[in-house]
Structure formats: C-alpha cells, structure tokens
Amino acid sequence: MDIKFIARLKTDYNNWKELFDSTATEMNIFCDDHKTVVGQIGKNAALIALYDVDSVSYTHLRAHETREDRGCRLWGV
C-alpha cells in the first residue's frame, strides 16, 4: 500500500525536515524509508509519500494516537 498526504507543519519546513530525516529507524517499522519522498509546499506544509507501507503496522501505530497528536508522533506535524 502507498500513502500520500499533505501535512500542515507546526514549525517551518526546514526544522521539520531535519526531524523527519532523523526518524528513519522508526519509519522502517511500517514502510520502506528508502522510497519515502517528501517535498516542501509553502513555509509550513509538506507533501509526504510513503511506499510499500505495511498496513498492519501502520494501522497499529495510528490506533495508539489521539486526535490531538495524530500525525505528530513521528514527524512533528
């Protein structure tokens, strides 16, 4: 499964990208981090494309997030 989404960032893109790049080990749990692509969309937004996502691992990760922290556990969004 592939997932593509736009994330509104709580910080500027460059700070977020540094955090994102530091999470490769965690990302490897549910997707092929070597195929992951990110791009800047304005100052505070990013396009994120995850490839070969293990749907079971990804669903398990998302199941433990609350609405308030959804999407920010790994990448600060």
Image (cartoon, rainbow, N blue to C red):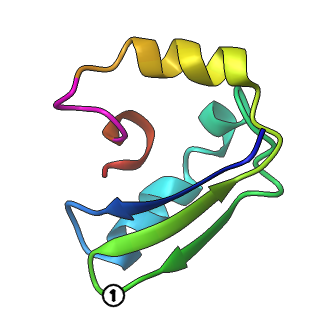
Q: Is residue 18 left or right of residue 25?
A: left
* Residue 45 in the image: above or below residue 70: below
Rendered image quadrant of residue 62: top left
Q: Percent x, y for residue 68?
A: 16, 31
Q: What element carries label 1?
A: loop
Rendered image quadrant of residue 38: bottom right
Amino acid type, mark 1:
Gly
Q: Quadrant of the N terminus?
A: top right
Q: Residue furthest bottom?
A: 42
Count of all numbered marks drawn on residues in the image: 1
* Residue 51 in the image: above or below residue 48: above
Please tell me whether the stretch drawn in magenta is mainly helix, strand or loop: loop
State yes or no: residue 70 in magenta: yes
Residue density around tag 1, few if under 14, some if 14–19, many if 20 or more, within 10 Å: few
Q: In this view, does 27 lie to the left or right of 74?
A: right
* Residue 46 in the image: above or below residue 69: below
Q: Percent x, y for residue 63?
A: 43, 13
Which residue sits at x=70%, y=29%?
30
Q: Percent x, y for residue 60?
A: 55, 12
Mark 1 sits on what residue?
42
Which residue sits at x=28%, y=63%?
8
Which residue sits at x=37%, y=33%?
73
Rendered image quadrant of residue 69: top left
Q: What stretch is highlighted in magenta?
A: 67-71
Looking at the image, which is closer to me, 50 or 18? 50
Which residue sits at x=34%, y=70%?
15
State yes or no: residue 49 in magenta: no
* Residue 23 in the image: above or below residue 67: below
